[in-house]
Amino acid sequence: MTKISDITIIDDDAIMVFGLRKLISCTVDCNSIISYGNGLLAYDGIKKKLEQKAPIPQIIFLDINMPIMDGWEFLEAFIKLPISDKIRINIVTSSIDPFDKQQWEFYKNKSHHLITFNQKPIDRNTIEEITKIL
Amino acid sequence: MLKIPQTSNTSYIISQLPTPTAFIDTDYNILLTSNKWKSIFSTNNQSYTSQSLFKVFPHLSPKWKMVLQNCFEGNPQPMGIHKANNINEEELWFEWSNAPWYDSDENIIGAIIQLNDITDSINNELELRKKDLLLQQQAEITKIGRWEYDLKDNNLTWCTTTKAIHEVPPHFIPNIENALFYYKEGHSRNAISMALFEAQDNGKAWSNLKLQITTANGNEKWVMSSGKPVYSKGDLVGLVGTFQDIHDQVEADIKSLNNEKLLRTLIDNLPVNVYIKDTESRKILVNKAECEFLGVDNPEDILGKSDFELYPEESAIKSREEDLMVMNTLKPVLSKETINIKLDGKETSFLSSKIPLLNDKGIAYGLVGISLDISKLKEKESELRNIINIASIQNKKLLNFAHIVSHNLRSHSANFSMLLNFLESEHDDEEKVRIIGMLSEASNNLLDTLDNLNDVISINTHTNIEKQKINLCDKVINVNQNLISYLFNNNASIKNNIPSNFIVKSVPSYLDNILTNFITNSVKYKDPSRKPLITLSAIKKNNYSILTIADNGLGIDLEKHGKKLFGMYKTFHEHKDAKGIGLYITKNQIDAMNGKVEVTSEVGKGTEFKIFFNDKD
């Protein structure tokens, strides 16, 4: 089992958050799993950690459709944060809108973080695959 | 010899003869000549007596020796015409005659040769023959024939050209009856008969009568006939005239006339406006369509007028500039879209062309204009564009909706499958109960989602729900009543500034929903630091009834969220009741009634929604 320090889940769907937590804890050995209900809460939380020089998450599970600040808005803000480490960001969505795929391509090329695009439902194998850290 | 003195005696008399005369002996030697002979043929009065006639005139035919021999025997014969040169080497024509020369004993001792100078008449004859030839050639070239009618003998003569025009053989002998018969029955024969009658009875000439004949070969031809009476000593003796084949000209004239008629018919009946302008941009030809366009019955009302008399000055200046450019550069303007404004202000869209008209030197002497009225086409085009716009907007909406549906259903089904997976492999009973609880929650969420989607679909499928005239003020009071406890609980108040007689056209249930939604939204997103106040007002403007709903709530950052404001499941506030479906449905209802909604907001101050109800349809 890969040892991961911190994992963050950003999703407004409580069932999805529950599921992801359950899947991750079965497959990955990690210190903590934090979840936020929308992009803005997550952004504020991570920014606060950065300021306090606390450890920031190595892996982020990101939903797209969320109130207040959606996944893309979060990414836009997140990649501007002064983070030199390569963070793994796994987008998890049920959208099949081609626009979302385009957005992903756009951010993938724009940032030094590793960004993957995954469609729901997510199974154990996928979790294993997308929690590897290079 | 007795002869000599006799001879010398008579020689004096002979020399005075008035005609050139010579006496020759039977050996053809010239013995005596008259002075006239000498003046013509001898250089120095010296006679060539004793010289042979055939030596003096070496070109005389030797046959004449035979003729003279006969003469010596008392049988003189005519000698004919022969030319000879005089002392000045001029060529003269003479008619030679001879007679036996008798002595006093009635013995023939020679011949007397007399010359008759016929040079003038020969020259005249030659001239005449030349003239005849010329006339004939002229007749052949111009196809103008001649004819003569001798009244006394009732004798008609045709020249070869006249015969050729009638297509009769050269030996044909015409007479006045068959000549008339060649004229086509009817007008032509009547006209020529009348002309002949008038000429004979009243001495009237006729000229250039255009008539038709049927030739001997049965061909129909156009001819031009002229004739005039000839008088001798005051009496009418005959008629002379000319006869010309003008078939080709007449046919060409008829053809060009027909062509002109065809062209005119074509131009007049073309469903486009056609005109021709001179170098001063004055119209010199217009067709029916152009007349109709300019509202006149008679082309004369337009001809000679320039654009300055037919159109407002501004358009006329533009048109004149274009005319000049076309005529100067010789480059046509083709199928250019123009808008024509008439003096009465009526606008017409044209597809117009202007083509320069060139003379044989390649210089423009005017231009031809062709304009196709495309106003209706333009109208249709803009209608079509509108429809395409609407269709594309609806398409986009549909696709967006399809993505929403797909997304929502997928997210629920993903949850189901995930939870069921957990349930299968879960051994802890307590955890199992928890997962089942979540499954039922997921199922409720799915039902909610389906309800919401149903609402949206029902709005978009019942677009022709009948609108009614509703008193807006009363409706607001009504909704207020329904929300009274909700408003009371939130300490909110409503200020209704809508005139009591303000009527809007709306589907009643939509209006209920719109009012309820905007009012509860305003309360939901109230600023916790102040008492919520919602102000409603309404005005009429440009076929719209505009309802304004203003609050003093949190406000929305429109720059950030403006685009998503009316999207499905978009919420911008951290509020536990925010579902992001209310405004989406409201917007759909307003759209379905051909209305629109505008929003202005300032974060921390409040939000103002303007709802436009369409009064027309």
Image (spheres, coloured by chain):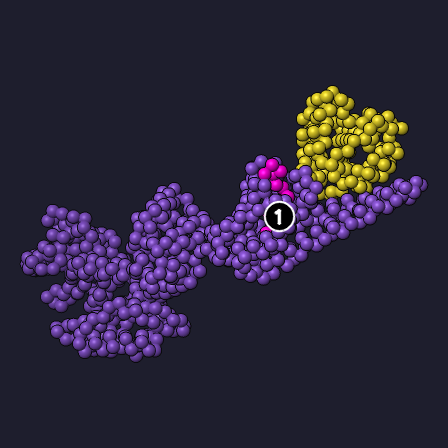
Chain colours: A yellow, B purple
Q: Is B256 contained in the magenta span?
A: no
Question: Which of the image's four quarters has the N terminus of chain B?
Answer: bottom left
Task: Give the class, few, some or many, for how many residues have Cα within 10 Å of label 1's Cα (few <14, many ≥20).
Answer: some
Report if residue B562 is visible in the image: no
Magenta segment: does it hold B523? Answer: yes
Give the magenta-colored segment's residue range: B515-530
Amino acid at circle 1: Leu
Return the residue nearer the eye: B489 or B22.
B489
Image-quadrant location for residue B271: bottom left
* Residue that sits furthest to the right in the current view: B427
Instruction: Say which chain tag 1 marks.
Output: B
Q: Is residue B6 shown left or right of residue B617? A: left
Image point (38%, 71%), residue name: B220
Label 1 sits on a secondary structure element that is helix
* A7 with respect to B211 (left or right): right
Question: Magenta span: helix, strand or loop, mainly?
Answer: helix
* Residue highlighted by disc 1: B487
B220, B129: nearer the viewer: B220
